[in-house]
Amino acid sequence: MEDLLLGLSENAEKEQAELNGDSSGEVLEGDDAIRALLGE
């Protein structure tokens, strides 16, 4: 289950980076990843 959530988080981070026009695909961790997913 943890692997599934990690995979979803990584995919969401990549999508968020694309939406932001960030081609580097910056990896966010912890609270930063959650904020990115929520769009905050």
Image: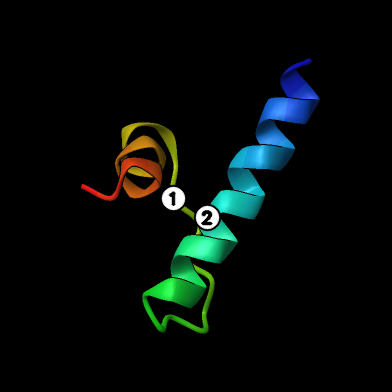
Quarter of the view holding residue 25: bottom right
- Residue ID at (29%, 41%): 35
Disc 1: which residue: 28
Task: Reply above or below: 29 against 28.
Answer: above
Q: Identify the mark at residue 13; answer none if there is no mark.
A: 2
Residue type indicated by callout 1: Leu
- Residue ID at (73%, 40%): 7
* Sequence-wise first label, 1 or 2: 2
Task: Reply above or below: 20 against 12.
Answer: below
**Mark 1, residues whose alpha carbon is within 10 Å: few (<14), some, or many (≥20)?**
some
- Residue ID at (55%, 64%): 15
- Residue ID at (46%, 62%): 16
**Mark 2, residues whose alpha carbon is within 10 Å: few (<14), some, or many (≥20)?**
many
Task: Reply above or below: 1 against 6.
Answer: above
- Is mark 1 in CB contact (under 8 Å) with mark 2? yes
Residue type indicated by callout 2: Glu
